[in-house]
């Protein structure tokens, strides 16, 4: 039996100013899994995530989330329906403390939310001693953990994560992989990732985006074996 | 020495009024990038509302309350009817708020004419204290104390409440605030209303210190307000407070030595600060 689809994007197109950035993105994201979006620099991965959550609203096509059409809604409404974004630049509020970064994200401050926060601090124990400090003083890896942790504090159904490995040391990327595996049991994840090791470590399904369009999809294991596809769209496999 | 003390008190009192004038301007810009050219007009409406109500009722406190209410209403209407329609369109905002400034400046002439309107201090604050050689004007002390109270309250709101947290976060990254499920436009509307009320409060308190008001005052304080905000750093209330006091003191001292340069010195302070720190004293570009 196929899994329930939590997100269904159909023929999505997005314009930014006069530029036609996305020209046909199609995604089907099954609940409870990690779906990876890959593609070259400038392919439109970030814009895809931003269009889904309404920051750059699509000009054509549809976005169905948890059974509801959400394209055209403002980002805060979409967020309240249970979607969260960990942006490429992490979007940390550096002038707020780590604790405040969590607090501002909390839609409720009930027992369940506070328990979830404890769980997040168990997943990212590095953050625990830093709660009272300004988030601007965290290391790059800690900021990434805060950004991901913050997005988990509500009972979200879908988490969009944009290139979390960017600029992180290899050891941190491993920590990240473990964290995403733990998150998976709570929330569906759509992960944009250029780091093929991380993508293959956590991804179950993949989509390749090229020139603003989804051009390939399938099961991650197949992509790992398919050197031709990797070279064609991702430019990997040329060296080694 | 006594002159120095007097100029300092006068400068701090004026600086506090600049703070009331500029805090809203700073937050409005910091949150939504809106440059409001009609903010000085709200200050001027505060002057008139306060002076008029006091002259009719003889109750100074009532005048202040009237000014705050008028400021809040004018600000609310302005935001709802005009500014909310042009979010993100900077040129349209500049043109529309400039138009609003002209409109407000003309509208006030209908009931009050374009001549000056004398403004009085309440009797209880008219006298001075004599401390040794130094004469301390009560009204100035009153302005400083009131300004400090407002600063403390604003600071508490910013640091202790979720609204304040949201404003601080929004000044830094409004997009991310939205992504966390917060309707930033609603926050902005409220901040706009609050900022307008504070500006009008500043006007009502400043008018008696000036002795008289006229419709042109709006434009003059608009420019001062912008300069205070730029010096302090857009979006930072602490920066605005420091900058307002700095500007108040600088123009107070200069006015004593060379009255014609009292405004020019603000421009000089601004240039010096911007040369050293382009984002202002507490600007967000500074990490
Ligand atoms: N605000 C904008 N204005 C104009 N063009 C833009 C804007 N944002 C993105 N683009 C363009 O849209 C294309 C897709 O950008 P996007 O950031 O979505 O790519 P990406 O796949 O995330 O790339 P990267 O791997 O570098 O993060 C790029 O060519 C980019 O230059
Ligand atoms: Mg990107």
Image (cartoon, rainbow, N blue to C red):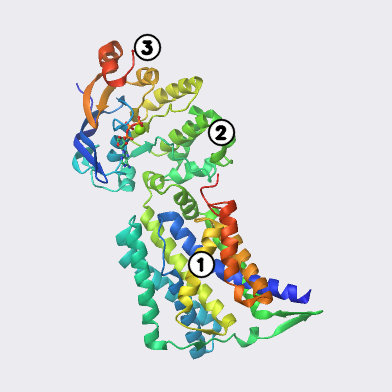
Q: Is residue A210 above or below residue B194?
A: above
- Any mark on residue A239, and which? 3
Residue B147, image x, y percentages: 59, 69
Q: Residues within 10 Å of mark 1 (few under 14, many from 20)?
A: many
> Which image quarter has ligand 1?
top left
Q: Rounded to the nearest whole Å, what is the CA distance between mark 1 and mark 2?
A: 42 Å
Mark closer to the observer (2, 3): 3
Quadrant into which the N terminus of chain B falls: bottom right
In front: B143, or B230? B230
Residue A221 in sight here: yes
Relative to A164, say whether B222 is above or below: below
Position of the C terminus of chain B by quadrant? top right
Q: Residues within 10 Å of mark 2 (few under 14, many from 20)?
A: some
Query: Which residue is drawn at the image coordinates 53% and 46% (left, top)?
Result: A95
A120 vs A237: above or below: below
- Whether residues under marks 3 and 1 lie with C-beta atoms below 8 angstroms apart, the answer is no
Mark 3 Cα shell of 10 Å, populated few (<14), some (14-19), many (≥20) = few
Q: Which mark is residue A128?
A: 2
Q: Which of A182 and B268 lies nearest the eye of the viewer?
A: B268
């Amino acid at each position: 039996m196929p899994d329930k689809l939590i997100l269904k994007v159909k023929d999505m197109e997005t314009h930014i100013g006069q530029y036609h950035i996305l020209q046909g993105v199609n995604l089907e994201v099954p609940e409870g899994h990690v779906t990876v979006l890959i593609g070259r620099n400038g392919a439109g991965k970030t814009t895809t995530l931003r269009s889904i959550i309404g920051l750059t609203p699509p000009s054509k096509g549809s976005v169905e989330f948890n059974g509801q059409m959400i394209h055209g809604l403002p980002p805060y409404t979409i967020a309240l329906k249970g979607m969260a974004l960990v942006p490429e630049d992490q979007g940390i509020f550096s002038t707020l403390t780590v604790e405040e970064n969590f607090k501002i994200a909390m839609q409720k401050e009930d027992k369940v939310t506070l328990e979830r926060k404890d769980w997040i601090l168990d997943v990212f124990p590095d953050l625990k001693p830093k709660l009272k400090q300004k988030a601007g003083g965290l290391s790059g890896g800690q900021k990434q953990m805060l950004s991901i942790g913050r997005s988990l504090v509500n009972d979200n159904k879908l988490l969009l994560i944009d290139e979390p490995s960017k600029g992180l040391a290899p050891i941190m990327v491993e920590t990240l992989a473990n964290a995403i595996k733990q998150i998976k049991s709570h929330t569906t994840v759509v992960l944009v990732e250029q780091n093929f090791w991380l993508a293959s470590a956590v991804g179950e399904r993949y989509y390749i985006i090229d020139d603003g369009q989804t051009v390939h999809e399938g099961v991650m294991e197949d992509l790992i074996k398919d050197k031709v596809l990797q070279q064609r769209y991702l430019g990997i496999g040329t060296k080694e | 020495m006594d002159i120095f003390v007097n100029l300092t008190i006068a400068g701090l009192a004026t600086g506090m009024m600049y703070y009331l004038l500029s805090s809203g301007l700073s937050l409005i810009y910091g949150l939504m990038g809106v440059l409001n050219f009609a903010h000085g007009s709200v200050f001027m409406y505060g002057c008139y509302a306060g002076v008029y109500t006091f002259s009719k009722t003889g109750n100074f406190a009532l005048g202040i309350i009237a000014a705050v209410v008028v400021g809040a209403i004018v600000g609310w209407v302005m935001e709802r009817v005009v500014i909310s329609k042009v979010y993100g369109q900077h040129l349209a905002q500049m043109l529309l708020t400039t138009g609003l400034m002209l409109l407000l400046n003309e509208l006030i002439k209908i009931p009050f004419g374009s001549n000056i309107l004398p403004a009085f201090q309440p009797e209880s604050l008219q006298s001075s204290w004599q401390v040794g050689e130094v004469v301390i004007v009560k009204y100035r002390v009153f302005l400083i104390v009131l300004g400090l109270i407002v600063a403390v309250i604003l600071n508490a709101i910013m640091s202790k409440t979720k609204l304040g947290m949201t404003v601080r976060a929004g000044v830094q990254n409004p997009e991310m605030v939205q992504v966390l499920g917060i309707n930033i436009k609603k926050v902005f509307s409220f901040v706009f209303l609050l900022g307008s009320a504070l500006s009008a409060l500043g006007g009502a308190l400043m008018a008696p210190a000036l002795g008289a008001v006229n419709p042109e005052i709006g434009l003059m304080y608009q420019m001062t307000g912008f300069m205070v905000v730029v010096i302090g750093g857009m979006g930072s209330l602490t920066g605005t407070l420091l900058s307002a006091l700095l500007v108040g003191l600088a123009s107070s001292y200069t006015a004593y030595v060379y009255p014609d340069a009292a405004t020019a010195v603000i421009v000089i302070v601004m240039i010096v600060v911007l040369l050293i720190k382009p984002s202002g004293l507490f600007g967000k570009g500074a990490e």
